[in-house]
Image: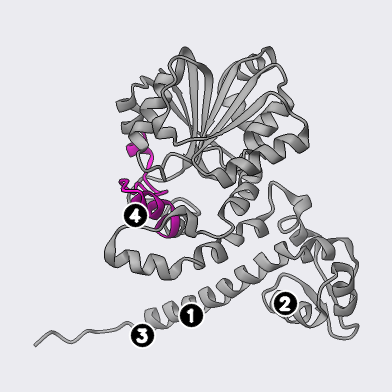
Amino acid sequence: MSAAVTIDSAKSEAFAQSLLEVLNHSGLALMISLGHRTGLFDVLARLEAATCQDIALAAELNERYVREWLGAMVTGGVVDYSAEEQTYRLPAEHAAWLTRAAVPNNMAASMQWFSVLGGVEDLVCEAFRHGRGVPYAAYNRFHEVMAEESAQTVVAGLRQHILPLVNGLLEQLESGIEVMDVGCGAGRAMNYLASQFPKSRFLGRDFSTEAIEQARRQAHSMGVANVTFEAVDVAEMNDTARFDLITAFDAIHDQVRPQRVLDNIHRALKPSGVFLMQDIAGSGHAHTDGRYPLATLGYAISCMHCMSVSLAGGGPGLGAMWGKQKALEMLAKAGFKDVVVESLDHDILNYYYVCRP
């Protein structure tokens, strides 16, 4: 017979209470995502205290849906409500984190990940049994949401924070150099840099034809002619000593052949070139990752996407939380002898690896 288990009732009740908070916050996250997608936060930020009807009219949305959504916002502490006036108001302090005008601090855009990842829950559940992963094609709106995320975590900080990590890089870009972005997605970073540094030449590569088409459309709309995009598997690149700068923004850990990609990047760099890699901050060990503010989210996204898409292609499934030690090992194996790891105050999610051959 097994020994009787003694339960600390206070500890048990505290845990139950925390789970209730998780349930409420999960519902709030979905509603915040809807508020972003429908433009409701942007409308509320422009209005003074307004009735539900006025808000729905200004947003050109159905009043009944807006009223129910506002219920979640009020009970969730996001929107203030006056029972006497029957009006709703988004405090400026909250708008500073929830509107498109708040980029790069618009956390409402990041809430979209829960619906994107929730859409493949059945497939991931099956993958727990067969172990083969879920392919990129299964993730509805992935590139759209990733492009918004990139605009905040990468593009918004490129010139002021990220590029200055490499001494003299801004001056080189001004003079004109060859740049490639590996796993460029919808091309937000390359299109931005192309518009800022017309003397340099930029190339974005990604295996997704959908993402590449988005990148090309944006380049056309921006009128930038010094950037090109190619739909290729970066594990098959064969460039030699071609680029002065290669970047990879949160792109290495979900590759099917990450070591080969790093090998290809090393070969593609000129001897004086630099590889700038942004990737998720973590140690690779759950018992020490708790010190990172978004570690639980990182593991969740990894399980639901990053690890799974790599496994789906027969890859190692490094996952988003592969950790600095593993990253440094793989960079060294690729031939990078000089690697400096940096952190930025504005980015609590990532490390920045400045790598020289």
Mark before the other along the chain sequence, 1 or 3: 3
Q: Which residues are magenta?
A: 302-327
- In which quadrant is the C terminus drawn? top left
* Residue bearing the label numbered 2: 69
Q: Is residue 326 magenta?
A: yes
Q: Position of residue 180 (x, y in %)?
A: 55, 26
In this rendering, does residue 290 appear at all?
A: yes
* Residue bearing the label numbered 3: 9
- Mark 3 → mark 2, Cα distance in angstroms: 36 Å
Foreground disc of the pair 2, 1: 2
- Disc ID at residue 286: 4
What amino acid does circle 1 point to? Gln
For image coordinates 71% across by 63% down, the residue present is 37
Secondary structure of the residue carrying tag 1 is helix
Q: Position of residue 153 (x, y in %)?
A: 61, 43
Mark before the other along the chain sequence, 3 or 4: 3
Mark before the other along the chain sequence, 2 or 4: 2
Foreground disc of the pair 3, 4: 4
Q: Is residue 172 above or below residue 230?
A: above
* Mark 4 closeness class: few <14, some 14–19, many ≥20 residues within 10 Å: few
* Residue bearing the label numbered 1: 17
Q: Is residue 168 magenta?
A: no
In this view, the residue in front, 329 or 34, is 34
- In which quadrant is the N terminus drawn? bottom left
Q: Is residue 273 above or below residue 186?
A: above
What amino acid does circle 2 point to? Trp
- Mark 2 → mark 4, Cα distance in angstroms: 36 Å
Q: Are marks 1 and 3 in contact (CB under 8 Å)?
A: no
